[in-house]
Image (cartoon, rainbow, N blue to C red):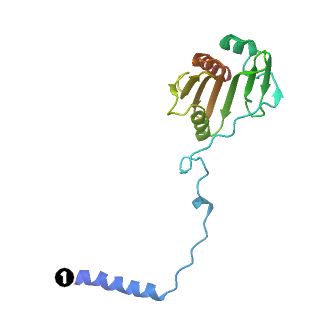
Amino acid sequence: MKRALILAVPLLALGACSTAQQAAPPAPTPPPTSAASPPAAGSATSPMPAVAPPAPEPVADGPCPYLESSVVADANGQHVTKVRTSADKPHPTCFFYRPDGSLQLTVRLYSGDVAVAKAIVDEAAPIATSNPASSPAGWKGGSLSGDKGALYAVAKGGNAVVVTTNQEQTIKARRITETVIGTLAL
């Protein structure tokens, strides 16, 4: 008998609450706060993937502030007659040219958001079509080679390095990548 009485009291109270709520007007919805605002694009909780910024363009004559022309000539096997740089900060992209005026090697650096660094590498060396790259230690990305040249692209944290060369061997692009990462202590 006591059990039936204990169950009946909460049910009656529940019914009274639902009747009271039906009669009362709905409470106004509070305005959204900054804490409830959606995360920024490319953030860890955002469903939207980060997008790589457009490829840099040369805007000024060199030299490259982090890579000597002689190192490029030795690694790539061609003379360097001209160097141009982009306007990117803190490190510009460096463009190295052959004696005939054609581009022989490009070094693109990025420092900033982790997701953007990864997007730059993924765009340059897509996982589906590139070979895995993991040099220097702790860096991850991909490498590609073909008739028109080779590419080595790796990222670590918020840093990305992408080296393209007019040579077919990825070893040349990898050596330049390792040199740049060592020089800048990335």
Percent coordinates x, y for residue 155 in the rendering: 58, 31
**In this view, which residue lies farthest toward the right?**
61
Q: Quadrant of residue 94?
A: top right
Q: Quadrant of residue 56?
A: top right
Q: Amino acid at mark 1?
A: Lys
**In the structure shown, which secondary structural element does the residue marked by tag 1 occupy?**
helix
Image point (59%, 33%), residue name: 121
For image coordinates 61% across by 70% down, the residue present is 31
Q: Residue furthest front?
A: 147
Judge by depth and name the residue closer to the eye, 72 or 40: 72
Q: Residues within 10 Å of mark 1 (few under 14, many from 20)?
A: few
Residue beneath disc 1? 2
State the count of labels: 1
Question: Residue at 57% across / 61% down in the picture?
Answer: 36
Front residue of this view, candidates 74 and 27: 74
> Residue 3 placed where, x, y %?
19, 80
Quadrant holding the C terminus: top right
Quarter of the image with the N terminus in it: bottom left
Say left or right for 70 vs 126. right
Q: Residue at x 60, y 32 (%)?
A: 124
In the image, residue 170 above or below residue 120: above
Q: Is residue 6 above or below residue 159?
A: below
Q: Position of residue 134 (x, y in %)?
A: 52, 24
Q: Position of residue 160 (x, y in %)?
A: 62, 31
Q: Is residue 1 above or below residue 98?
A: below
In the image: residue 1, left or right of residue 34? left
Q: Nearer the viewer, residue 62 or 129?
A: 129
